[in-house]
C-alpha cells in the first residue's frame, strides 16, 4: 500500500522524510501526544517523538493538558503493537505530519 499512500497524501515528500526518520531511529510511527501547556511527565516511559499520537485516531478537537496527560498514561499503560497498528490504520492520512 506504500505507493497508494504516497500519492494520496497531501505532502508525499514529508511522508518519505518521516519514513526515513523512522528507519534511522529518530522517530517512531506512534508516540505520546504533545500539548504546548503540558509538561513532560517523568513517570511515563521514554519514547521517541512520534509521527502520530493516540489522539490521531480520535475525533479532531482540542484537549486540555490533563486530558492529554491521561491519554498518554493510558497509551503507555495499555500498550500493544495492535493498538499502534490500529492508530496508524485509522489515521494513515496524517502520516505526512511534521
Image: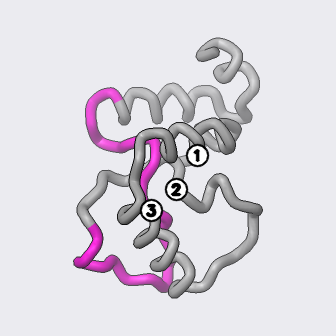
Q: Which numbered disc flags the more N-terminal residue, 2 or 1?
A: 2
Q: Residues within 10 Å of mark 3 (few under 14, many from 20)?
A: some
Q: Which mark is nearer the camera, 2 or 1? A: 1
Estimate the x, y position of residue 46 in percent, counting from the top left. Answer: 24, 61
| Range of magenta residues | 23-44
Residue drawn at (60%, 61%) of the image = 55
To which residue does mark 1 refer?
A: 87
Residue 93 vertical position relative to residue 64 in the rendered view, above or below: above
Q: Which numbered disc flags the more N-terminal residue, 1 or 3?
A: 3
Residue 37 vertical position relative to residue 21 in the rendered view, above or below: below
Residue drawn at (56%, 31%) of the image = 15
Residue 29 vertical position relative to residue 16 in the rendered view, above or below: below
In space, the residues marked 1 and 3 are separated at their CA atoms by 11 Å
Asked if residue 27 is among those painted magenta in the image, a careful observer would answer: yes
Magenta segment main secondary structure: loop
Estimate the x, y position of residue 90 in percent, counting from the top left. Answer: 68, 42
Residue drawn at (66%, 53%) of the image = 57
Estimate the x, y position of residue 5 in percent, counting from the top left. Answer: 67, 23
Q: Choose between 8 and 11: the one closer to the eye.
A: 8
Secondary structure state at the residue bearing disc 1: helix
Secondary structure state at the residue bearing disc 2: loop
Amino acid at each position: 500500500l506504500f505507493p497508494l499512500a504516497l500519492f494520496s497524501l497531501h505532502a508525499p515528500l514529508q511522508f518519505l522524510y518521516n519514513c526515513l526518520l523512522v528507519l534511522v531511529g529518530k522517530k517512531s510511527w506512534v508516540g505520546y501526544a504533545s500539548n504546548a501547556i503540558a509538561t513532560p511527565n517523568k513517570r511515563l516511559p521514554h519514547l521517541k517523538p512520534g509521527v502520530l499520537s493516540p489522539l490521531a485516531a480520535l475525533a479532531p478537537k482540542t484537549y486540555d493538558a490533563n486530558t492529554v496527560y491521561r491519554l498518554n498514561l493510558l497509551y503507555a499503560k495499555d500498550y500493544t503493537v495492535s493498538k499502534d497498528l490500529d492508530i496508524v490504520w485509522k489515521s494513515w492520512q496524517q502520516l505526512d505530519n511534521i
